[in-house]
Image: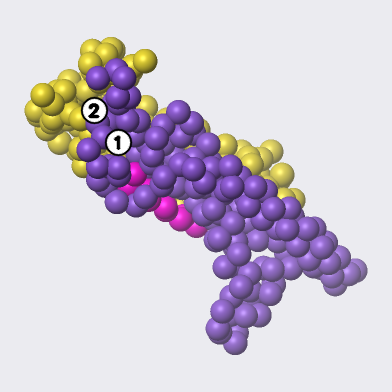
Amino acid sequence: MKNADTLINEGSSNMVLTNIESVPGMRVTAHFGVVSGSTVRAKHVGRDIMANLKNIVGGELKGYTKLLQEARDTAMERMIKDAEALGANAIINIRFATSSIAQGAAELYVYGTAVKLQKSA
Amino acid sequence: MEFLLILFLIFLGFFAGSLNEKIHYRKIAEEEMKGRCLPLVSFQKEILYGKRVEEAKLLSGSVVVSLDYFKRILAGINNIFGGRVSAYETLLDRGRREAVIRLKRDAAGFDAVINLRIDTAILGGKVGCIEVLAHGTAVKYASNAGG
């Protein structure tokens, strides 16, 4: 079972992410400021045709759910890379924002505060 | 001819849409029963005070839902007279509950989810097409046996 120590000592791929202002059981030793990642995605023509058909009967548009999820993952990756470059081992207080900037295109933006954590005694 | 097509779409939207919604609501109720044991709160402090937290992780669940053709027209008519637009109420309700269910599904192995936030975004161009994102921090308590 992973404990707090290994969580911190493992590579940066194991960056701790939370949307609260701290990480329970840990102490923040340094702040590196805001890090962010964003991506703009346009719809796929094939998916758009399917979505238009699905729009008649309503319900979940699975193609779009997947598309936005992938885009959000990309934005998160960019944010994590940003934090890694600063030498942080956690990002706290993460916020998501979605804006439709044009017909058929959406921007997904993720931002948070990069910090260095230490296990609190 | 065009009129007939619109009429057909309205009927198709009405029947398929209602059926779709009924099935979706039944599924939602089932899944909510399955996930009811996991505490989910919207504040930041860990619940069950005094317990040590061993692991924290950001979780999210999202869904894109849209209105059917009939309800889109119904909502348009509702817009003229004002008042409750029940077509949109059920759409938002379905979206939010489904997003929370997906978040809980990811929380397997954790003891609680804190600071739940739900965001709703309108997807450009399409009327009655929304994306709901639920995100929160899952926490796992340190077991007493392990110290």
Place of residue B53 in the rendered image (x, y in percent of width and height, measured from the top left) = 27, 31
The percent position of residue A68, horizontal first and vertical second, equals 51, 40
Secondary structure found at label 2: strand
The residue singled out by tag 2 in the image is A90
Looking at the picture, tell me which residue is in the foreground, B32 or A12.
Answer: B32
In the picture, the quarter occupied by the N terminus of chain B is: bottom right
Chain bearing tag 1 is: A
Q: Label 1: few (<14), some or many (≥20) within 10 Å? A: many
Q: Which residues are magenta?
A: B114-123
Q: Is residue A29 left or right of residue A9?
A: left
Palette colour of chain A:
yellow
Was residue B115 drawn as part of the magenta stretch in this picture?
Answer: yes
Q: Report whether B9 appears left or right of B101.
A: right
Q: Quadrant of residue B20?
A: bottom right
Among numbered discs 1 and 2, the one appearing first in the sequence? 1
* Position above or below: B94 against A13: below
Total labels: the figure holds 2
The label on residue A18 is: 1
Residue at the image point whose x is 46% and y is 55% from the top: B121
Q: CA distance from mark 1 to mark 2?
A: 8 Å
- Tell me the crowding category of disc 2: few under 14, some 14 to 19, or many 20 or more residues within 10 angstroms, Cα based: many
Q: Type of residue at label 2?
A: Ala
> Which one is nearer the viewer's eye here, B101 or B11?
B101
For image coordinates 82% across by 63% down, the residue present is: B15
Residue B31 can be seen in this image = yes
Q: Colour of chain B?
A: purple
Looking at the image, the residue that sits furthest to the front is B145
